[in-house]
Amino acid sequence: MELDERKLKILQAIIRTYLDTGEPVGSRTISKYTDLNLSSATIRNEMSDLEEMGYILQPHTSAGRIPSDKGYRLYVDTMLEAKTSELNSLQESLEAREEKIDDVLQKVAKFLAANTNYATMVSGPRYQTKRVKFIQLTSVDADSLLAVIVLDNNAVKNQMIAIEEPIEEEMIVKLNFILNTTLNGLDVLEMNLALIQKIKEQVGTHTQVIDSVLEAIGKTLIEEDDLEVYTSGATNILKYPELSDKSKAAQILDAFSEKEIMHNWLGLPDKTQGNGEAHDIQVYIGDETQMESMKDCSMVTATYQIREGVYGKIGIVGPKRMDYDKVVGTLNSLMGQLDDIFKEKQK
């Protein structure tokens, strides 16, 4: 007797249902799987064949079936083969050099939602400290300059600066040279009074312009990033009875749609982390999530690092009875691949 595709799907449905409930599984339960589209009678016949082949057992008369060791082994081997294939496929797509970071993170969110059956979210990268990459002063008219400030995260800030008197083009070139050679690669904490005084001494005149430019740079460096949060599988929470209550589900789904809440929830990566080795995997249960709408949920988070000082968070949300071993294992596996991919992108 051959284990064809239909029998394999029924076996997988039996095992998944048994893992969820711990109760023997009957044909009527399996017939509710929409992707099978089979009658109870047909499923009973297939279950009889599976029992004869040794993949399932009937613990006692009139009961449903449970998986045998042979059935578990086939399920695990098939599952691992599928997961390996999916991980390889994901890695191939992520390793494409033209792949943008936001595309990578969107794929990560979708991959985790599909493979854990929980809701997932991934924050865009956040810089622990931002540094000056480039400054360009340009004359607009006799009363103003345009300062274009570019940071190492490629954020661009434009600032109009009022001037008391016209500045010659030759002087603007000199200002640009001094500002860029002195401030390039510095963060806000490194711009101390001694450095500012040094710049003013080099400039000689137009110190008011220097003060205005430095003020604009300081504001730009300490501004909060408008971070993107990528979510996937939010409706997966409806699969779990304890979370499918209308009011509870609405609160949880609303939380996933509010980016400000998501930012606070994911939080900043711990600045004591970031050695590129530990992913700081944390588990938050119930009230530990610090969100009223999530008090019946658990959340597992991990920190990814694109490069030194550039971090983000990945979060997986499900019921308190979530499969923690599977979630942590999946995160560990994926985080290792992300480390390799981000390192490759820096070459």
Image (cartoon, rainbow, N blue to C red):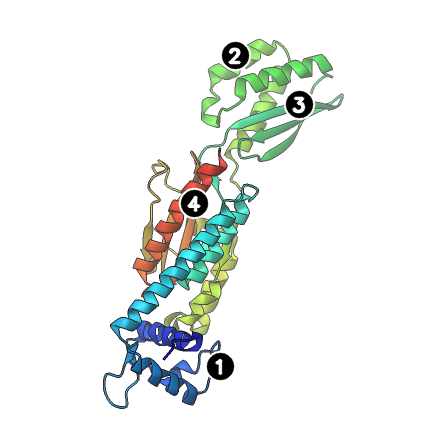
- Residue type, mark 3 in image: Leu
Whole-number angstrom distance, CA of label 3 to CA of label 4: 39 Å
Residue nearest the observer in this picture, 225 or 43: 43
43 is higher (above) or lower (below) than 224: below
The mark found on residue 37 in the picture is 1
Residue nearest the observer in this picture, 55 or 164: 55
Q: Which residue does the image show at 45% across and 66% down from the upper left? A: 236
Label located before the other in sequence (3 or 2): 3
- Residue type, mark 2 in image: Lys
Label located before the other in sequence (2 or 4): 2
Q: Residues within 10 Å of mark 4 (few under 14, many from 20)?
A: many
219 is higher (above) or lower (below) than 286: above
Q: Which residue is mark 3?
A: 137
The mark found on residue 198 in the picture is 2
Label located before the other in sequence (3 or 4): 3
Please, what secondary structure does the residue beneath circle 1 have? Answer: loop
